[in-house]
Amino acid sequence: MPHTAELHPLLQGLNKSDYNVESLDDEIRVDSLCVDLLRHLYQELVQKKGLQPEQAGGRCHGADYFLREFVIPERHKNLFEVEAKDLLQFAGHWYIIRTPEPNLTELGKILAGTAELYNYLASQKMVSQKTANAISAQSEALDYFQKRIDAFWAIEGEGYDIWRDACPL
């Protein structure tokens, strides 16, 4: 019998459809479910991966921001249905226009945490490894995201439409 990763009790009973967001009540419920999932990720990072609590907390905070500020309230999307294009639209557009001082340092932490979460979910067979790999690859496109931030700050006149169309939501 092939060896499989042992699922944490939280994930054993997890029903992906519980993360569907169709109403405000769903949004509140899913938000709470995400907090629980991220707490488990934190434990995994500290106990099994040996990260320092501050490092693990930073990664969880990054994933938390992506999920609880963008995926759930803005996209009304199930976190198990997220694709790399969602991360591209988040980092290349939404984060930039929604953040008073968008910067690659902060964005890089969000992207790293999001990649960590999806790699973990793939290791637990909750998303495909292909999805996790695509999200990880997208999270590493830091040069592209820096160019998007720089281009945003350089917008003049009617230039916003051109900037927006290069990476539309």
Image (cartoon, rainbow, N blue to C red):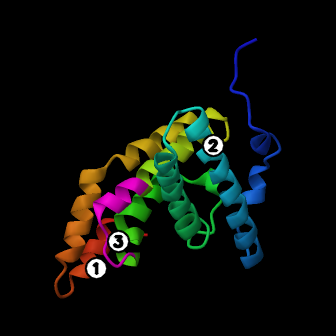
Residue 59 drawn at (x, y percent): 48, 50
Reading the image, the residue beneath label 3 is 96
Q: Is residue 105 magenta?
A: yes
Residue 79 visible in the shown view: yes
Q: Residue at x 60, y 35 (%)?
A: 47
In the displayed orientation, state which residue is furthest to the top. 1
Q: Residues within 10 Å of mark 2 (few under 14, many from 20)?
A: some
Q: Quadrant of residue 1?
A: top right
Question: Which one is earlier in the sequence, the residue at label 1 or at label 2?
Answer: 2
Left or right for 118, reference 156: right
Q: Position of residue 85 (x, y in %)?
A: 45, 55
Q: Write down the region rendered in magenta.
A: 99-109
Residue furthest to the right: 13
The residue carrying mark 1 is 161
Towards the viewer: 124 or 92: 124
- Whether residue 40 sits left or right of residue 60 in the image: it is right
> How far apart in space, not on screen, are marks 2 and 3 (Cα)?
31 Å
Q: Residue furthest bottom?
A: 157
User: What amino acid is at disc 1?
Assistant: Asp
**Secondary structure at numbered mark 2:** helix
Q: Which residue is mark 2?
A: 43
- Residue name at image x 24 percent, y 74 percent: 152
Badge nearest the viewer, 3 or 1 = 3
Residues marked 2 and 3 touching at CB (< 8 Å)? no
* Helix, strand or loop for disc 3: helix
Whether the magenta-drawn stretch holds residue 29 is answered as: no
For the residues labelled 3 and 1, the Cα–Cα distance comes to: 14 Å
Tell which of 161 and 108 is nearer to you: 108
